[in-house]
Amino acid sequence: MSDTSYKVITIAGATGLLGFNVANAFLSDGSYKIKILRKKPESENKNANLLASKGAEVIYVDYNDNNDLVKALKGTDVIISAINGTELVTSQRALLNAAKVVGVKRFIPSEFGVDIKEITGEVHPFLKPKIEFFQELEKSGIEYTIIITGLFYDYLGILGFDHKNKKATFYADGNTKIIATSLPDIGKFTVESLKLPEARNGTVRVAGSALTLNELLKKYEEITGTKWEVSNDFTVRQRYKNNTAPVPTLLEDFGAFLTVNLDIKNLHNDILSFTPQPITESISNLVKN
């Protein structure tokens, strides 16, 4: 059963890696009318066509035109944002302003990662836009839900796992726990979040997997049938900040940041109606592809 107060769900960023899985989960649930927003001008997109074939209404909008967004969002009960990149704050802010006008009941922002309220150490530049927007959302008066899922299975490589060369670089102690979730399960959990009382103006957390770096390494070794070469590099963030040789890349710095911020507490897995996909399946797919 869906929450009867929510009938129309509008998803921004629905043709991207995350957004497509969220939109697909809502369409599979079948309890809501689904709109997906795409940026003008109109263009051909395989994922948009596939979602439309399943019943989604595709609407092209200009995020710089408030009247355009208001028209597109009319009748929307819940906005879900899967927007990322440099436009995360500006596009979500535009959505939020239009949402106030049309009376949107709930806004689920583009979080779906680490818990921004429980960050260890200095905040990484990639997350500052998310924190900035959440502060605006919190003051907006619109209900919100923050969904925390840990790392996407597809992005395990950012933690230092190089399956092509059978090498692992640990950015923290091997006993550091990593929470991660598959993209299809993130979509399913987003659907279920609308039915959870604790999701109203709150944070809900889910984990498809909760393994240490050492345990993840063992999974990789079992799947590849090879003993991996392992090295430790615990000074990545310090070297990046101080521009000290060998200077890490921005992505390596982000990987080191994530490694110590993915041990997410207070999970809500006990209220899920489904069993999350095992991480071994995704690792196998990553290795094969």
Image (spheres, rainbow, N blue to C red):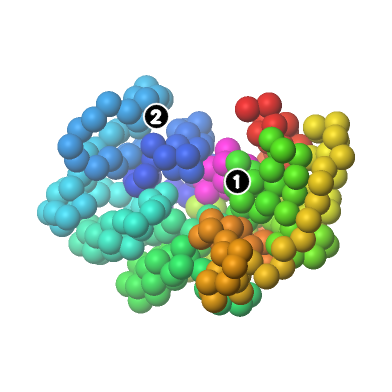
Q: Nearer the viewer, residue 201 or 138?
A: 138
Q: Nearer the viewer, residue 273 or 148?
A: 148
For this view, does 175 lie left or right of residue 142? Answer: right
The amino acid type of the residue labelled 1 equals Tyr
Q: Are marks 1 and 2 in contact (CB under 8 Å)?
A: no
Percent across and percent down for residue 10 are 34, 46
Q: Residues within 10 Å of mark 1 (few under 14, many from 20)?
A: few
Provide residue 76's location: percent of width, then percent of height. Answer: 30, 49
The stretch in magenta equals 181-191
Split into 4 quadrants, where in the image is the C terminus?
top right
**Of residues 193 and 240, which is closer to you in this image?**
240
Q: Nearer the viewer, mark 1 or mark 2?
A: 1
Residue at screen point 60% across, 46% down: 155
Q: Is residue 184 magenta?
A: yes
Residue 264 image position (x, y, % from top left): 68, 64
Does residue 238 lie above or below 25 as drawn?
below
Residue 235 visible: yes
Q: Nearer the viewer, residue 141 or 243?
A: 243
The amino acid type, in three-letter code, at marker 2 is Asn
Say whether residue 275 is visible. Answer: no
Q: CA distance from mark 1 to mark 2?
A: 20 Å
Q: Is residue 87 magenta?
A: no
Identify the disc placed on residue 155.
1
Element marked by disc 1: helix
- Numbered mark located on residue 47 in the image: 2
Above or below, 30 against 80 in this view is above
Q: Quadrant of the N terminus?
A: top right
Residue 44: quadrant of the picture: top left
Residue drawn where x is 42% and y is 49% of the image:
82
Where 192 sits versus 125, above or below? above
